[in-house]
Image (cartoon, helix red, strand yellow):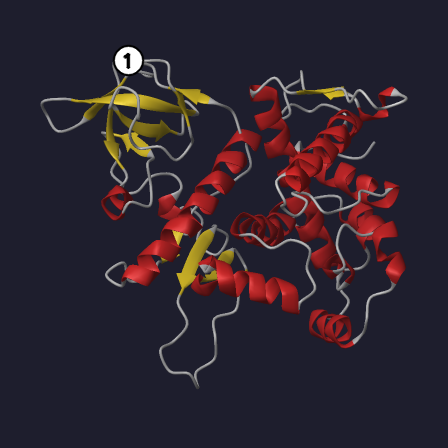
Amino acid sequence: MRLFTCQHCGQLLYFENVTCESCGHALGYLPEQGTVSALKLAGDGTWQALAAPGRSFVPCANLAHGVCNWQLDAADSDDYCLACRHNRTVPDPAIPENLLRWRKLEVAKHRLMYTILKLGLPHPTETEDEGRGLAFDFLADPPSGDAPKVMTGHDDGLITIALVEADDVERERRRTALGEPYRTLLGHLRHEVGHYYWDRLVAEGGDLEGFRALFGDEREDYGEALQRHYANAQPDSWSDSYVSAYARAHPWEDWAETWTHYLHIVDTLETARAFRLRVDPKAARNDNLSAEVDFDVYADVPIATLIDAWLPLSFAINSLNRSMGQNDAYPFVLSSGVIEKLAFVHRVVHGVRPA
């Protein structure tokens, strides 16, 4: 993600900020301009954005719940911003625990939508494209202990996220129980939206044969494949071809996991570029661990350019985390087989057809 500054005082800002801590200006994200802007209240109840002079904006209705800082054009007939209008079901905000968890989910979802918009990916709502739109259900478990728990998953564009995943203790418990090295809300959302984009970009007129050559035949029975995955121990050699052990379960999951890591890499590299980070370790005997992110990560650059920058950067990030007594931020190995799959995702994202 890029860096943002207050247009009034120059203070550096986070993507989620609603107030500049330096000058006190209200802040809002303008998705069309791709920037956080300082705002001034106009006499007609709209906001004037310093980053878009002459335009009038109104806040997303979800600002009232403290879960969104995005703005929409004052003439827009919708009450919700480009991100929140994808919500189909949200938890009852009158329940404090629900509201706290929903806020965490929205932080992750808005970061996901930032990347979708930057990549220029299609993102119709259910209203705009019935049966093919992208929608989110953020669901709390039923109060009865005997009722089935909410399952996180994807179904024809509807992404369901169990609200309990926003509880840090429960999410860590599940991570440990499943033997996962990594489990985050943003990771969940990137993974589930990956299934949506497999349908849109691969199954519907994409390079299906190229997909099958790399990921396997998705026509394999999905339910049986998951049963085998959870019933059997994973071989130590899984990392030769897969970015995670779960990716072995089924070609759809392999795609979704690889898609997730592609978004991890692109978004983090953009942040590194915004900070002008350069990795050049003194102890290295060669330049294999040297990198400078001096290119537009959202452009159709060769996948090798992304990977050559990512490997040194992730090594540096992991080293910094270990210095703070934290687990690796990126506890994964990108084998040549995984990089080939990432290259396929990269081509699909940029609409590059095979020669």
- Quarter of the view holding residue 18: top left
- Quarter of the view holding residue 235: bottom right
Bin the neighbour count of mark 1 within 10 Å (Cα to Cα): few under 14, some 14-19, many 20 and up. few
**Measuring 39% from the left and 67% from the top, which residue is drawn there?**
140
Residue situated in front as seen by the camera: 2 or 70: 2
- Image coords of residue 285 (percent x, y): 90, 22
Q: Is residue 46 left or right of residue 12?
A: left
Query: Does 80 sit above or below residue 105?
Result: above
- Image coords of residue 342 (percent x, y): 75, 40
Please name the residue that numbered disc 1 is placed on: 53
- Image coords of residue 180 (percent x, y): 68, 60
Does residue 99 appear in this view? yes
**Measuring 47% from the left and 50% from the top, which residue is drawn there?**
133
- What is the three-letter code of the residue carrying label 1? Pro
**Measuring 69% from the left and 38% from the top, which residue is drawn there?**
318
- Image coords of residue 334 (percent x, y): 80, 42
Q: Is residue 115 left or right of residue 205?
A: left
Query: Does 343 sit above or below residue 5?
Result: below
Does residue 127 appear in this view? no
**Measuring 42% from the left and 30% from the top, which residue is drawn there?**
14
Please identify the quadrant where the C terminus is shown: top right
Residue situated in front as seen by the camera: 139 or 73: 139
